[in-house]
Image (cartoon, rainbow, N blue to C red):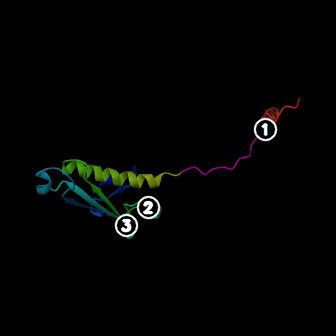
Amino acid sequence: MLQISGTLHIKENEIEVNAIRAQGSGGQNINKVSTAIHLRFDIKASSLPESYKLKLLELSDQRISKDGVIIIKAQQFRTQEKNKEDAYHRLKTLITSVAIRYKSRKATKPTKGSKVKRLNSKTKQGQLKQLRGKVDF
């Protein structure tokens, strides 16, 4: 069971984890041992709340396929256990990023004092520029 928050968790049977061979250099070990982890999580078939599902499907993340499946490939570490932990952690951060609600912005108007201050600075700058003109003798 993957614990997302205090009340939200995902069952192990909803997450498909496969061990695959990692890419890149690694000597002879890379050809023999499957240390990379390929994690697949189907958003639509999961037990997540409907609001989470909708927000996840709206994300423009390259890890989410058109079918609504999150695909995470973890191959940063040399051991399979660490890569599995890393994949679970990345899935958890992706889901928690959707849970954050941002405050809506309230439209405000500038104060009277700030308007006067702005206009005074504009006139002062204009006068300064006039003084830079040609001088008549």
Local crowd at mark 2 within 10 Å, few (<14), some, or many (≥20)?
Answer: many
* Mark before the other along the chain sequence, 2 or 3: 2
Residue located beneath label 1 in the image: 122
Q: Quadrant of the N terminus?
A: bottom left
Q: Nearer the viewer, residue 78 or 85?
A: 78
Q: Nearer the viewer, residue 85 or 31?
A: 31
Q: Secondary structure at mark 1?
A: helix
Q: Secondary structure at mark 3?
A: loop
Percent across and percent down for residue 38 are: 25, 59
**Bounds of the magenta segment:** 102-121
Residue located beneath label 3 in the image: 65
* Mark before the other along the chain sequence, 3 or 1: 3
Residue at the right extreme? 137
The residues tagged by marks 1 and 2 sit, at their Cα atoms, a distance apart of: 48 Å
Please, is residue 66 above or below residue 80 in the view?
Answer: below
The residues tagged by marks 3 and 1 sit, at their Cα atoms, a distance apart of: 54 Å
The type of residue carrying mark 3 is: Ser
The type of residue carrying mark 2 is: Leu
The residues tagged by marks 2 and 3 sit, at their Cα atoms, a distance apart of: 11 Å
Percent across and percent down for residue 94 are: 39, 54
Q: Nearer the viewer, mark 3 or mark 1?
A: 1
